[in-house]
Amino acid sequence: MSTATASPTLPAVTPGGDDGPLVEYRFIRWHLAAAGVSILITMVAGFLYSLQFLGYYPFSGSALSPGHIRLIHTNFAAYGFLVNGFTGMTYYVIPRLTGYRVWSKKLGYFIFFAWQAILLFAFLGYLFDKAQAIEWGETPTGFRPGTFELNWVPVDLLVAVGAVCVILQFMVPLYKARRQRYYVTLWYFTAGYIWLALTYLMGNIIPEWVLPGTAGAAVTGLFIHDLVGLYVTPMGWGLMYFFVPLILKKPIWSHSLSVIGFWALAFFYPMGGVHHFLISPIPDYVEFGAISTTIAIEVVVTTVVVNFFMTLKGKYSTLRTSIPIRWFYAGAIYYFITCLQCSFHTTWRFQKIIHFTDWVPGHAHMIMYGTFSFWLFGVIDWLWPRVTKREWASNSLRSWHFWLSTLGITIMFLTLTMSGLIHGFMQRELNPWMDIIDMSVPFWYVRTFAGGLMLSGLMCGLWNMWRTAHHDVPYVEEEHYASDALDPAPTGAA
């Protein structure tokens, strides 16, 4: 990989011609639209799941049981919303940073339709008891270990094939541009795709077939953590390093900090996953290694957050004028909060209190929704008018989407954090289990209310996307945006 550069040269080829445009806007539209549908399914499933804690769950029968609905909630967030969103985003970013088109338009069609088919088969598998027992990796395998008897569509293996296709689609232009000086976004994306292949095979396929017992649990813990840290995180930070300087029309504050953040992620993050299984039969030295590397990465995260807030210096007015910037920086704040929280709760002393309490889902919702989903919402807000060639139908709905989502996730995080702490201390004092449940119920009502706010905000955003796609007002570049033909790449300060 070439050394990152402060000013990447764009483009290496003419953005058009006989072979088609540099950027395939059709694939961007399709993947972002699919991401919107997936996050709607995710949010509805999560809202329904929360109702069981209040005694108001509306469905009976095994297919729509709360356990099945939870699988839809978590997996459609990861494989539906985030993967579709990041794929759509990279169709815009990678060609503009490398100057080369993605590998194949036909492969682009295959990836889109095959991935949605995988989501559909997975959805059916979750409803009809075909899920496997790997957290965030419940996608049905289709085979029974030892017998190789086909009993369902092998979704798990198809996901691996789909991931390989995505990697090929975007690694080809990255390879063609290997003699250029990579901007830091391409560092993150290149590593993210390599880690994706390794992480999925390691954590979601090998444990089921090869590793039994505690060894399998340890590797599964790595999968849970590394799927977030070695795919979602590099893709998220990569898009931030591209879109924030582009929108602010200002170089990233420190190129050196961006490189430090990348190598710290690569060095520390892979070993942190076992902290999901502290106080378990996994050897203490393995747990201690996970604790140490987790704390180390959280310290380095601070440098990344500082880098982005120093970039905003002198451009604070964009928080008022640019909704995408609001999404990006609200997500950055939430990222810092969750990482600071993680550096404490990953220790043995904290785990004795918060393990198996509401603290954990509060943390998970903040990082997956409050950070990475917020960043994708910011990308969608900026890209959607450009790829549909229509002005936003309603700026009010854009604002409602942001503020309802921000208020909802903040309330949910604070509520679950407080509930988790009280639960943990009551459990330490050996209070009766039903007393802990009675204490938790009021918090669960607030959690469902917060989820309703987030779902309402999402509905505003999706309805606005639909209206915009059918809007009759053509898109007009705002003064602070470059024209589409001369859209500059982000720059980084040396």
Image (tube, rainbow, N blue to C red):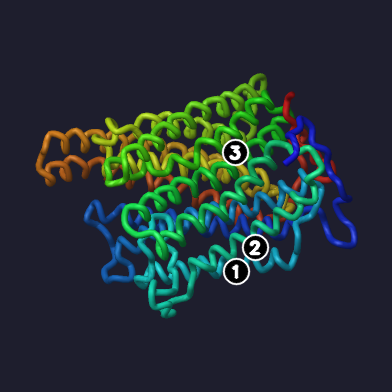
User: What amino acid is labelled 3 in the image?
Assistant: Trp
Give the Cα distance between marks 2 and 1: 10 Å
Regarding mark 2 in the picture, which secondary structure is present there? helix
Give the Cα distance between marks 3 and 1: 27 Å
Q: Which mark is residue 237?
A: 3
Report which residue position mark 1 lands on.
Answer: 114
The residue depicted at 54 percent of the width and 68 percent of the height is: 158
The residue depicted at 52 percent of the width and 33 percent of the height is: 330
Relative image position of residue 54 (x, y in whole percent) = 23, 52
* Mark closer to the chain start, 2 or 1: 1
Regarding mark 1 in the picture, which secondary structure is present there? helix
Q: Evaluate if marks 2 and 1 touch, with contact meaning CB atoms under 8 Å apart.
A: yes
The residue depicted at 32 percent of the width and 47 percent of the height is: 448
Q: How many callouts does the rendering have?
A: 3
Relative image position of residue 339 (x, y in whole percent) = 45, 32
Who is closer to the viewer here, 454 or 49? 49
